[in-house]
Image (cartoon, rainbow, N blue to C red):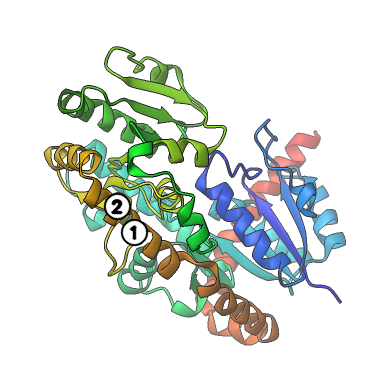
Amino acid sequence: MQNHLVIIGTVWPEPNSTAAGSRMLQLIKLFQNQNYKITFLSSASKTDFSYNLENQDVKTHYIKLNNNSFDVLISELNPSIVLFDRFMTEEQYGWRVIENCPNALRILDTEDLHFLRKAREIAFKQNRLLNSKDYISDVFKRELASIYRCDLSLIISEYEIELLTNLFKVDPSILHYIPFLVEPISKETINHFPLFSERSHFVSMGNFLHEPNWQTVLQLKKSWKSIKKALPEAELHVYGSYVTEKAKQLHNQKEGFLIKGRAESVKEVFYKARVLLAPIPYGAGLKGKLLESMLFGLPNITTEMGSEGMHGNHSWNGFITTTDEDFIEKAIELYQNQTFWQQSQQNGIQLINKRFEKSLFENDFITKVNHLLANLDKHRNQNFLGQVFQHQTLQSTKFMSKWIELKNKT
């Protein structure tokens, strides 16, 4: 019988808007290559930019929150595996999956660790260093409980794997490192990269509704005048989906600080630009814009936060900076220095092919999934904390959901 994967999405994937959307499509493709039937469920509304999953042979269903129609649907689908997109989705539907499909393998795709991003945001906005107390928030407790309740959690960053296992002592058997999964950069692709002399201007990229991206734009605004003074012909083109009114107010034609909005083609935008600027002040996971800059031969300037979990022992695709002054200086240098620019591009190619090429991770992941499917009872018995969290946490979630469901009916 064909294996069936059901994905419960927080939103419908938008690969041209978010890195999370691209990652979801990568996971779908991975399972399809293993001949899985796939169904995608979400309670969110689709947008004009939602990916057409039906064209990829993925069936879709709209589901309702706090409604037993989900119980009927998930029972009929009878999946081999249920993948929850972020811990909030597992909170909402996990107990219903357990009740109706107890033998389904439950996988949580964390996307990134939300509690880590939240802790860093608090420290950043209070203009101080992060301390261990910042981690222990309500988000931390909810996310860790969700990780324990699931049979396996997908972690996108090596840094986050180390944080969970070393600091919080999470059993490695319920975690699996799987970063972005991309095709290798071939010699043919490299030969089509525009040359240094064929590129001009700086570029920035990021969804404006994502708070770390907005803070990155504000950081750019602070640094841009100094860069522009040294490079009067240069412009900064700021791209991103869901442009807000406050973002539009930063647009300044005279200063060359141009808010461009959504990019119809990231490849086209990145092929034209000479340097990507990403002074990311905080966040978590891996940064899709930096990965894409490497894929399209575009060197970048970023921060330690931006490069976290990406380069390992390899040289960076440009510069990693620690101060505003260093960021400005290195942006000017990379824009002007053709020799270093070309070496940075080569570094990016090596990073992609040695750290994110999909064949490096796919077989290990499928082997892990198949092992869990064949030994699910044993695995769950060893994850005794998961059973504790199911008993304690999900009972409150379950009965709150049932109360809302009854209230809606009356």
The answer to whether the residue labelled 2 contacts the one labelled 1, judged by CB atoms less than 8 Å apart, is: yes
- Mark 2, Cα crowd under 10 Å, few <14 / some 14-19 / many 20+, is some
Q: Is residue 133 visible?
A: yes
With 297 as the anchor, is 84 left or right in this view?
A: right
- 313 or 149: nearer the viewer: 313
Residue that numbered label 1 is attached to: 346
Tag 2: amino acid: Gln
Residue 252 placed where, x, y %? 32, 14
Q: Quadrant of residue 125?
A: top left
- 113 or 27: nearer the viewer: 27
Tell me the quadrant of the picture where the N terminus can be found. Answer: bottom right
Q: Is residue 395 visible?
A: no
Q: Is residue 198 above or below residue 314?
A: above
Most extreme residue toward the left is 325
**Mark number, residue 342:** 2
Q: Is residue 48 above or below residue 327?
A: above
| Residue sitting at x 84%, y 61% | 77
Label 2: element kind:
helix
| Residue sitting at x 44%, y 78% | 171
Label 1: element kind:
helix
